[in-house]
Image (tube, rainbow, N blue to C red):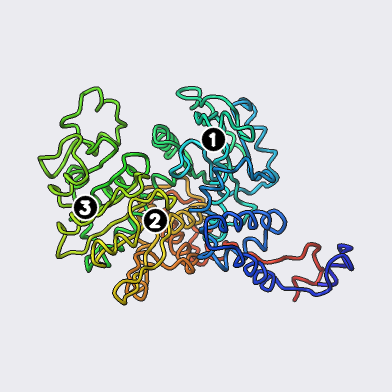
């Protein structure tokens, strides 16, 4: 307003009309809508949003909150993959923090360079496995930035309470090592003990300054992702989104898929699942669903027997595998390679072979191999589950890495498929009927997990808390959305869904005895307490009016 312009000596330096935040947001969306509806247009829109973020953070987050369904694909997947690939060339300003091997011994002092004292959420990557694009080193910073934008818009975490981080331990990507505009260290990646020492120093530095902060590990390659999670998960508030977040999201999708086919959540224990992909995401998803089966009444051995995990060399199975090869598997991979409900399962069996003899009821992809679920695979799978509807969840992203498109899945199953994908697809028209896909996107779970766990000041994130998040997400799908064929809520309701998830996580944490927030321990209503602590973008006076709080 004009009094504030006078206090800031801005009268005459800006146009005379005072426009509200809502009016400014409409203008921004009008500019975004002018960009072409293709990859090039999405990239340009992302650049525009980055510039807006730099000059007016409140307006940026308000636009994102009000238009999250349209803008989420621009600030995160699938556009963020292109952003990371071209991060050096498009770099304009630093955002977040970079910890490199050249800073060893200084991490604990470096954290004090960050200007905000009250950090609640950190998203950190070492850039070793960015989406399905591989090792992008320091250019993986686009992932934490995009994730935290969604934390603010979908989860209600204030932007000054989040911190994107890259830990630069080098890169093994020859293209980046030869790239003159690469922003990271041009040296091979650290491994083994030296790598672990860097991560340990980072975690200790964060805990020294922000002891109640939640650390979300993001896009660490499979060989280090699970060991890091195992090392820290019982000691501090953290989770790995690729392993646990994806697992919780897929579990939510699986429960909603069962509901879509007329089954109850308890019938999850009766499903047989083929998981294509034995990396951190595939094994993490499998472990999460397996644990839910155990919680539903199966023994550990019975639940493991319902999974068939396939990787590039075929079925992961101890039978037919050399002892040395089996010993080289991670313990969590070995668990899924040892016990099968079908005795014929042998190392190297093809996807089609496994579908033929195991007759799975769910087909899940985490392979990053585009088109892997071809017509023969889908039709064979469909034929084996009749009269039930086939449940297909191709999780790989970006879209160019997805195992099957929605249009093909609809065509090859005569419209009977229950479908949820990691990347977005458009609705499909077939025989006069419109089919609406669902995106199995972690944004339905991780903002709520972070919101609930951080506000409740939980000591750790337990498996039960993540299962509670899955159930809350699945139950958030309305009957109207189910009638349209959806198995995830509509994205425009994401803040309400995140609140439901956050409440479920905090209440479960209370039952688990890991909540330390005094107000909640004293009996405060969890939903009301979390809602009052949630952030929504609005302008506040730059110079406080003495009468402002009396109005």
Question: Along the horizontal axis of the image, is 533 left or right of 504?
Answer: right
Q: Nearer the viewer, mark 3 or mark 2?
A: 3
* Quadrant the C terminus occupies: bottom right
| Disc 1 residue crowd, few under 14, some 14–19, many 20+, Cα 10 Å | many
List the residue tagged with mark 2: 508
Q: Mark 1 or mark 2: which is in front?
A: 1
Q: Is residue 193 visible?
A: yes
> Is the residue under label 2 in contact with that under label 3 (CB below 8 Å)?
no
Seen in the picture, residue 406 relative to 238 is either above or below; the reply is below
> CA gap, disc 1 to disc 3?
38 Å
Residue on which the image places disc 1: 137
Q: Which mark is residue 177?
A: none
Closest to the camera, between mark 1 and mark 3, is 3
Q: Of callouts 1 and 2, which one flags the residue occurring earlier in the amino acid sequence? A: 1
Residue 376, label in figure = 3
Disc 2, SS: helix
Distance between the Cα atoms at labels 3 and 2?
Answer: 43 Å
Judging depth in this view, the residue of 504 and 7 nearest the camera is: 7
When the figure is inspected, residue 296 is found, relative to residue 100, above or below; the finding is below
Q: Secondary structure at mark 3?
A: helix
Q: For numbered disc 1, what is the local secondary structure?
A: helix
Residue 387 as seen in the image, left or right of residue 484: left
């Amino acid at each position: 307003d004009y009094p504030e312009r006078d206090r800031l000596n801005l009268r005459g330096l800006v146009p005379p009309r005072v426009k509200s935040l809502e009016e400014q947001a409409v203008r921004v969306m009008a500019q975004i809508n002018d960009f072409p509806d293709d990859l090039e247009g999405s990239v340009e829109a992302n650049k525009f949003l980055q510039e807006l973020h730099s000059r007016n953070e409140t307006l940026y987050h308000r636009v994102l909150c009000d238009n999250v369904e349209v803008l989420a694909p621009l600030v995160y997947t699938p556009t963020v993959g292109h952003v990371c690939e071209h991060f050096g060339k498009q770099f304009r300003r630093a955002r977040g923090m970079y910890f490199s091997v050249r800073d060893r011994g200084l991490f604990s002092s470096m954290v004090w360079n960050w200007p905000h004292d009250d950090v609640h959420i950190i998203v950190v990557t070492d850039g070793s496995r960015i989406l399905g694009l591989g090792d992008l080193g320091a250019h993986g910073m686009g992932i934490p930035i995009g994730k935290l934008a969604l934390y603010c818009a979908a989860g209600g975490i204030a932007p000054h309470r989040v911190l994107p981080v890259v830990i630069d331990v080098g890169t093994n990507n020859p293209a980046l090592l030869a790239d003159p505009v690469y922003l990271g260290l041009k040296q091979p990646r650290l491994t083994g003990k030296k790598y672990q020492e860097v991560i340990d120093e980072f975690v200790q530095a964060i805990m020294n300054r922000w002891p109640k902060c939640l650390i979300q590990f993001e896009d660490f390659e499979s060989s280090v992702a699970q060991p890091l999670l195992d090392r820290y998960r019982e000691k501090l508030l953290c989770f790995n989104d690729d392993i646990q977040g994806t697992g919780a999201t897929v579990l939510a999708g699986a429960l909603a898929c069962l509901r879509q086919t007329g089954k109850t959540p308890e019938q999850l224990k009766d499903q047989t699942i083929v998981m294509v992909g034995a990396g951190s995401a595939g094994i993490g998803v499998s472990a999460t669903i397996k644990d839910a089966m155990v919680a539903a009444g199966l023994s550990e051995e019975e639940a493991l027997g319902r999974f068939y995990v396939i990787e590039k060399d075929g079925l992961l199975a101890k039978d037919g595998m050399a002892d040395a090869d089996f010993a080289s598997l991670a313990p969590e991979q070995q668990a899924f390679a040892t016990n099968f409900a079908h005795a014929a399962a042998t190392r190297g069996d093809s996807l089609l072979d496994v579908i033929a003899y195991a007759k799975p009821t769910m087909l899940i992809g985490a392979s990053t191999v585009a088109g892997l679920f071809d017509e023969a695979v889908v039709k064979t799978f469909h034929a084996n589950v009749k009269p039930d509807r086939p449940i297909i969840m191709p999780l790989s992203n970006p879209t160019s890495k997805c195992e099957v498109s929605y249009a093909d899945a609809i065509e090859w199953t005569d419209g009977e498929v229950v479908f949820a994908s990691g990347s977005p697809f458009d609705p499909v028209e077939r025989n006069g009927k419109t089919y609406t896909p669902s995106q199995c996107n972690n944004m339905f779970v991780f903002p709520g997990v972070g919101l609930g766990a951080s506000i409740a000041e939980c000591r750790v994130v337990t498996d039960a808390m993540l299962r509670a998040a899955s159930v809350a997400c699945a139950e958030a799908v309305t009957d109207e959305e189910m009638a349209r064929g959806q198995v995830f809520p509509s994205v425009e309701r994401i803040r309400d869904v995140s609140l439901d998830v956050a409440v479920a996580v905090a209440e479960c944490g209370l039952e688990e005895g890991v909540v330390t927030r005094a107000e909640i321990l004293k009996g405060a209503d969890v939903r009301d307490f979390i809602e009052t602590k949630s952030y929504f973008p609005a302008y506040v006076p730059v110079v406080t009016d003495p009468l402002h709080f009396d109005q």
